[in-house]
Every structure is written in C-alpha cells, then in structure tokens.
Amino acid sequence: MKQANTKRLILSAALDLFSQHGYKGASIRQIARAVGIRESAIYNHYKSKEELFLAILTEFKSRTISDKILSDDLLDDLSNPEKFLKNFAERLINYWDTPPERKFIRLLLMEQFTRIGNKELSTTDYLSELRKMCRLIFGEMVKTKIVKQYNPEILAEQFIAPLFLIRTEHLVAGENKNMNAVFKIVNMHVDFFWSAIKT
C-alpha cells in the first residue's frame, strides 16, 4: 500500500513540476524533493524521467471522459437538445477546470508536438475520446432530424474547438478566474452553435 501511495505522490509531483517547467525544465531531483524522498527512491518506481513522463501520459490517455461528463440526468436532457448542449458544455468546462486536468492541459500546451520516447504530445490525442463521443451524439441528432443534415464529424469539431479554446484562454487565470464570465462565454457559444444547426 505504501509503495502504491509513493508512486501516486511521485506522479502527482511530476505533473506539478512538468506543468510549471516543462519536460526539460523539471528534474528528478526536484520531483524527489517535492515528494520528500531521496532521488534514488524514484528509480525504484521509474527507470528514468522519460518513463515517469510517459506514465503521466498513459494515465491521462486511459481516463474515460464520458464517465465524468455523461450521466443519467444529463442524458434525460436529450429531449431538449439546446439544454443538453449547454449542460454538456458546462460539465466539460468544469471537468477541464479540475486541478489535474488544468495541469495536464498546461503541460500539453507547453510540450505540444514534443516527442518523448515513442510518444508525441498533441491536443488531437487528448481530445480524441471527446470527439468520438460528440460524433455519436450529433450523429443521432442528424439521424433523428433534430439538427440540419451536416456531417457529425464537422459538428463535433465546431462544438468542441471553441470550448477548448475558451478553456485554454482562461487557464492562465488559474485559481482566481471568474467562472461566471467563463460560463457566460460558453453559453454564448452554445446559443450561436445551436441556432446555426437546429432544424
């Protein structure tokens, strides 16, 4: 149990430091100091800084965003698509506002297209599951003629991209940002998007 907890603390400290200083700027020594262990103790869990970094990528890639966003009460809103899209967008922004996601998005933006080991960081990978989920949702809306006959892939992109941009623009505000202002912009986006696609 203690070993698993140490591993978790190492990953958490590494994410903090990588998101502040980038991959090259953060050292194993800094990570060990942040955890309160000897530098050599990190090597009991990870062979190298690269392996530690790849473990963070694997952890974030393995997360299932649909579990965090979709719920029975949200799915009940599908009968009112505009309300569904607003609630979906707000939940997505709240999910991206959790401390681990904020740190990972910051790291992603700092290291975009950097190849570490055999992995390359990209927003394409980070958003791939969300894109699939939105393609399915918009595919059903097109099929049931709730929205105009557009390609669901294009609809997913047009819905997600501005939301991710809103999230990244407000990332620098950190803990002090005004979430009411963020949600106002999100709702304006959803209103504009819905008015453009509804039948």
Image (cartoon, rainbow, N blue to C red):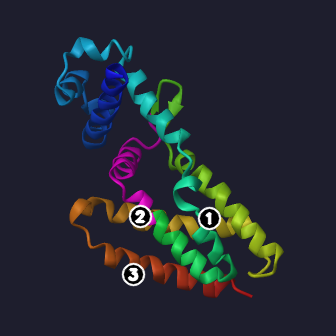
Question: Gap in Å between the C-alphas at discs 1 and 3?
Answer: 20 Å
Residue 28 in the image: state x and y as whole percent.
25, 22
Magenta stretch, residue numbers = 93-114
Residue at 27% x, 59% y is 172
Left or right relative to 51: residue 67 = right
Residue at 39% x, 81% y is 184
Q: Where is 167 relative to 13, above or below?
A: below
Is 175 colored magenta in this rendering? no
Q: Are marks 1 and 3 in contact (CB under 8 Å)?
A: no
Q: Secondary structure at mark 1?
A: helix
Question: Gap in Å between the C-alphas at discs 2 and 1?
Answer: 19 Å
Left or right relative to 162: residue 99 = left
Task: Give the number of the mark in front: 2 or 1.
Answer: 2
For residue 184, the mark is 3
Along the viewing direction, whichever of 140 and 160 lies nearer the viewer: 140
Q: Of callouts 2 and 3, which one flags the residue occurring earlier in the amino acid sequence?
A: 2
Along the viewing direction, whichever of 45 and 75 lies nearer the viewer: 75
| Three-letter amino acid code of the residue under disc 3 | Lys
Q: Secondary structure at mark 2?
A: helix
Badge 3 density bin: few <14, some 14–19, many ≥20, Cα 10 Å: few
Residue 161 in the image: state x and y as whole percent.
53, 64
For residue 157, the mark is 1
| Three-letter amino acid code of the residue under disc 2 | Asn
Q: Quadrant of the N terminus?
A: top left
Residue 178 in the image: state x and y as whole percent.
27, 73
Residue 81: image quadrant is bottom right
| Three-letter amino acid code of the residue under disc 1 | Glu
Q: Secondary structure at mark 3?
A: helix
Check disc 2 and report the residue beneath it.
94
Badge 1 density bin: few <14, some 14–19, many ≥20, Cα 10 Å: some
